[in-house]
Image (cartoon, rainbow, N blue to C red):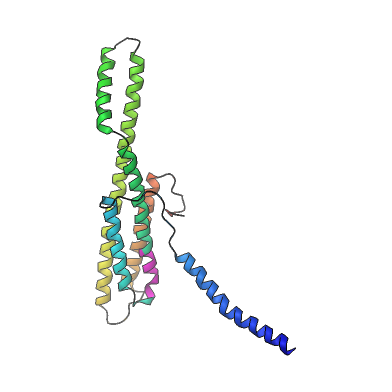
Amino acid sequence: MTALLFVLVVIGVLALVTVPLMIAGTRRQQEIPPAVGGRKPLLGSTAQVWVSRGERVLRELTASLRDQPGFTTLSADAEQVVMELRVTARQVAELDHTIARIPVPDLEDERAALAAAIAEADGAPAQADLVRAHDAVSARLAAAARQRETRDALLAKMQATVMEFERARDELAELITGTTSALSPNTGAAADLTSRLDGLREGLVEVRRATDPEVGPSGQGHP
């Protein structure tokens, strides 16, 4: 009976130690941001510069909030903004790669030459083939134009997001230096910052959803 009681006590102690560790491990797994796949933006490219600036803001925000335990939600929102910036930058990199494969100047010259040939071949048997060739070249040029427009829209959204992100960082610093005690997450200014960061993340998701049919309707740009 004593041996059985001892075994039960040992099992209970192990459960008390193991269960919290399992819960903590699960939470850590949930907090790890999902891996971002796809083509990386080139170093020095516009997309990479915006991501770099966003990551700097995140580091500074995290440092500012280190002694503000009530603002874990704000830190998490800031991390999500940077995650969406990275995803958007990779979409821009994919578009840049695709655009670079379309020789726009050569195609424009070819389309002009085909247009002239079509005019000269008025009524000739070859005219139909020349028209089909002209249409094919025009379609490639139109595709390149659409892709450039999409890329430019994504870059514009990244720029606006980072600048608003930097503004939020500066306002947070002002809040911290303007108070004599720890910030409260219930203050109106703090709630406004949290809402603004969430809006920045959603804005990036929305513009990517509008330009990429593979972005799901859940509002999340990554798995």
Say which residue appears at 34% left-offset and 62% top-offset. 197
Number of marks drawn: 0
Q: Is residue 200 left or right of residue 1?
A: left
Q: Give 114 or 186, whichever is nearer the viewer.
A: 114
Principal SS element in the magenta part?
helix
Q: Residue at x 33, y 19 (%)?
A: 131
Residue 130 appears at what percent x and percent y?
A: 33, 18
In the rendered image, residue 201, in percent from the top left (x then y), is placed at 36, 58
Q: Residue 6 falls in which quadrant of the image?
A: bottom right
Locate residue 25, reporting x and y percent.
51, 70
Instruction: Read off the magenta span.
Output: 70-78
Residue drawn where x is 46% and y is 50% of the image: 217
Residue 32 found in image quarter: bottom left
Residue projecting furthest to the top:
124
Q: From the viewer's side, name the closer residue of 189 and 197.
A: 197
Q: Is residue 136 magenta?
A: no
Quadrant housing residue 108: top left
The answer to whether 1 is drawn above or below residue 138 in the figure is below
Above/below status of 102 relative to 28: above
Relative to 71, 20 lies left or right: right
Please state the horizontal and vertical placement of residue 81, each as a whole percent of the image.
35, 60
Q: In the image, is residue 76 part of the stretch drawn in magenta?
A: yes
Residue sitting at x 26%, y 15%: 119
Image quarter in which the N terminus is found? bottom right
